[in-house]
Image (cartoon, helix red, strand yellow):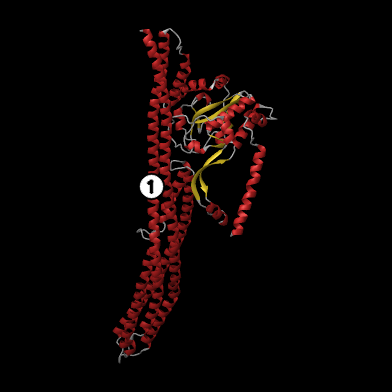
Amino acid sequence: MYKRLIILIVLCSFIHVPVLGEQQSLFPFFRNTNLHKITQKVISGKETDSAKVYAIHKWITSNIKYDLKRFQQFNYSKVPLKTILKKRKAICRGYSDLFNEMCSIAGIPSTSVPGYVKDIYYDQGDGFFEDEHIWNAVYFNDNWHLLDATWDSGYVQFVKMTIIGKILYFFSWHRYTIFRYRPHFVSSPSEFYYCKSGYYYKSDHIPADPIWQMVSPQYSLKDAVLDSSFYFLLCDTITPSPINKHLNNQRRFLASMDEVTRNIADGYVFHDYNHKNHFAPGQSHLLKALKFFPDIDQKSFDSLKVINQCDTLLVMLLKSRSNLDSNFFYLSEQKALLSEKNKMKHEIMAGHYKLLSKSTTKCETLFRSGKSICRQGQSSSKKLNRDNRSKILELDRIPSYANSNNAKKTNPVDSAKAMDEIRLYRDSADIQVKIIKERINICDSIFKKTVSNFYFYAAYSKKHRNDGKAIHFLRLSGFDDLDLKIRMLKDTLIKYKFPADSAILDSTGKILVKELYKEFQKLNKDFSILLKYNKNIVNKCTALKRSCYFEDFSSQAYSETLDSFSVKVQRLSPEISSFSGKFSLLADMCGNLAKLAKKEKKVYIEEKTIEDALYISRASYIIRHFKSRALHNTQYKKLCRDLENITQKIRGKYDKRKV
């Protein structure tokens, strides 16, 4: 075992080192944090703008990791580029700023595109409130192109294989492992969002300013919310972005603005497109006020002019606070909606768990009782064979015939009557043998049906268990009951679960082996009836002997009766004996299926445990998001109030002068 563990460690080291070496040789990270030098090195040898943009995008996605800790704190504040280069970490804003700066050094126009995204936290039909993601638009080849370096740099994986899980995964030949909920960023550079059309972006990237949609005609926010392409994991990879020179000029004008002016202009446009986004105009009014504040001429002797300037500034701040108050209201609405959906997801899971667990528990109980019934059936089969052998002896030991004497004179009436009754009972015995054979056929048919249905149940139980484990992984990866990936697996599981569970039941709702056991029990009665008919024949043979002078007729009938009964029982004996093995097989199957049902139930219990934990985690995420954005909102309001107080003091000073 230790040798294999050492081999595993050595193999892992050989597997990972060349890959990292190859990646770093293609897109080396420079120790120097001078972005100008880095950019020149990255675009060195690239003659066209498209080649330069590609190199910049590839370098960023290969060298900058997503700062998951910062994202989980909802800290969207601007980070200096030197800090990003030093830590090699950033969130979307950092990626966007870095790309813009490198493009600027390369002499290529680019800009940030704030907006809304449909990601793992988004559910179909959710509304949009604040714009919390940023990607880029870059201009080359006479057109603007969209790209998202953040999403192309890798992805967040919510589960991590434990050390024990890795060892188990290796020694089980990749069949088993152990995961834990450990969100972490996985670097995986790609080009999924590199220079794709506006129609491609439409499925999950909605710009806060519709001018950056790059589609014609532009779609409303309502259309974006109702668009189900993201839910169905679809995106338009065929329709090209339209080239509109007029809009391109407007975009270039927006891209040329300084950051403050752009933020002021964007705020009003963002609100026009999304009336629930009140933070953007609140920020715009505040930035406008901060930009206007130095223009107040506090050295002027024109009191009226200064008072008017102060009033203008106070109106801006009033509008800012009003929008920020509205934004707090919509943040509260968002929190309530997300909390309600989170509760709904948990209730959906709880409802499914109740149904699946109840059905599986019932199956487990039935299989355990079925095993006991089969053991009884096995004993009954052996007992029936013993009883049949004793019946042969019992018939042979009837003393009435041997103790009877022949009549001194034949009585034609009594002898004829006895002969008729002997023929009648023989026919009845033959019919009873056919009934026994038919009963055996029925039991055999039930047995075959039971075995077939048990195999059917076993196959689907294993499938349900595998589907359940796949659902576990999806849940730990951030998916929930309102996402297509889980819905497809869960709906399929539920669709086939109950028919598979019902397959082990008979028409009365009992396990099939119960029906087999009941039918088999009837054979004991059938053989008793057959013995009764043969006893009656023996009695009639005795009556025939007593009514006839000659013994030949009665003796022959008596001997034939004994031989016939013995032959019939012996011929049926192997078929009866076979049911001992059949009941034994079913008992073993019931035992194995009970274990299978227990394992399946364990999967559902584990899923519920995971969902219970994720329900709390999602609730915590919603609260933390609300508190973070509300705090950000409050900080802006405080800034408004501070600036209002300063402005009021200036105005008050000039009011006194006016007097």
Quick one: quadrant of the C terminus? top left
Q: How crowded is the residue under tag 1: few (<14 C-alpha within 10 Å), some, or many (20+)?
A: some
In this view of the protein, which residue sits in the foreground, 408 or 135? Answer: 135
Furthest toward the right, the residue is 45
Name the residue located 54 percent from the left edge and 27 percent from the top edge: 112
Residue identifier under label 1? 350
Which image quarter: residue 388? bottom left
Whether residue 237 is visible to the viewer of this picture, yes or no, is no
- Callout 1 secondary element: helix
Residue 252 drawn above or below residue 371? above
Q: Residue 620: x, y in percent? A: 41, 40
Q: Residue 265: x, y in percent? A: 49, 20
Locate residue 119 relative to residue 196 in the image: left or right: left
Q: Residue 362: x, y in percent? A: 38, 57
Name the residue located 65 percent from the left edge and 39 percent from the top edge: 24
Which image quarter: residue 635? top left
In this view of the protein, which residue sits in the foreground, 310 or 279? Answer: 310
Quick one: quadrant of the N terminus? bottom right
In this view of the protein, which residue sits in the foreground, 255 or 463? Answer: 255
In this view of the protein, which residue sits in the foreground, 3 or 54? Answer: 3
Residue 641 drawn above or below residue 418? above
Whether residue 480 is visible to the viewer of this picture, yes or no, is yes
Q: Residue 481: x, y in percent? A: 43, 43
Amino acid carrying label 1: it is: Ala
Locate residue 234 relative to residue 538 in the image: left or right: right
The number of numbered badges drawn on the structure is: 1
Residue 557 drawn above or below residue 155? below
Name the residue located 44 percent from the left edge and 21 percent from the top edge: 286
